[in-house]
Amino acid sequence: MATRVLVPMDYSDLAEKALRTTLSLHPDADITVLHVIDFRSSDLGPGGWGDEPDEFDQWLAKAREHTHELLADAEAIAAEYDVDIATDSVVGEDASSILEYAEDNDVDLIILGSHGRSLPARILMGGVSETVVRRAPAPVMVVR
């Protein structure tokens, strides 16, 4: 049985479903909910943060506020199951940050939601869950 479970979480319904699945199947595990603040999600993109020197810092501060809200929601969901969880966030690229976190923290199992994108969308945008499944240092459960 898994003792250290990582649940990468974004703002999707499937991420919430992955968390609920984790809480149901592994209530006695050490569960960590991780949110990756992906700097590529800005319309301006990395290196294109505009003319103001602090534009990235302002964006990051707002992203951290949203992350705090997301992780508080995750803690509230865990409380519904009477399970204590840990939460964490990192700034980086989604898939590689999840993989690095799993390796650095000796995770036994990763449970994440699949966005169920079509093949063309996966080719164009990449698939976080697909990349994690292929490269993870631990077993992965994908929830749909």
Image (spheres, helix red, strand yellow):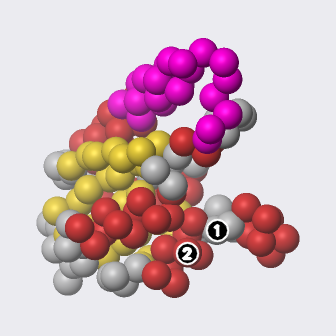
Q: Are marks 1 and 2 in contact (CB under 8 Å)?
A: yes
Considering the numbered disc 2 on the image, is that residue within a helix, a strand or a loop? Answer: helix
Left or right relative to 44: residue 18: left
Any mark on residue 127, and which? Answer: 1
Q: Up-down: is 37 above or below 130?
A: above
Where residue 129 appears, x then y in whole percent?
Answer: 55, 70
In the rendered image, is residue 11 in sight?
A: no
Task: Residue at 42% x, 60% y: name it.
Answer: 97
User: Which picture quadrant has residue 49?
Assistant: top right
Task: Residue at 65% x, 62% y: name it.
Answer: 115
Quarter of the image with the C terminus is: bottom right
Left or right relative to 139: residue 121: right
Q: Tag 1: residue type?
A: Gly
Please tell me whether residue 47 belongs to the stretch shown in magenta.
Answer: yes
Q: Name the residue that disc number 2 marks.
A: 131
Q: Residues within 10 Å of mark 2 (few under 14, many from 20)?
A: some
The stretch of residues the image draws in magenta is: 46-68
Q: Up-down: is 18 above or below 132?
A: above
Left or right relative to 101: residue 48: right
Please tell me whether residue 63 belongs to the stretch shown in magenta.
Answer: yes
Where residue 40 appears, x then y in whole percent?
Answer: 61, 45
Where residue 68 appears, x then y in whole percent?
Answer: 36, 31
Task: Residue at 77% x, 72% y: name it.
Answer: 123
Any mark on residue 15, and which? Answer: none
Q: Main secondary structure of the magenta part?
A: helix
Q: Tag 2: residue type?
A: Thr
Considering the numbered disc 1 on the image, is that residue within a helix, a strand or a loop? Answer: loop
Q: Residues within 10 Å of mark 1 (few under 14, many from 20)?
A: many
Task: Residue at 35% x, 39% y: name it.
Answer: 71
Q: Up-down: is 104 above or below 68?
A: below
Where residue 110 appears, x then y in whole percent?
Answer: 36, 71
Quarter of the image with the N terminus is: bottom left
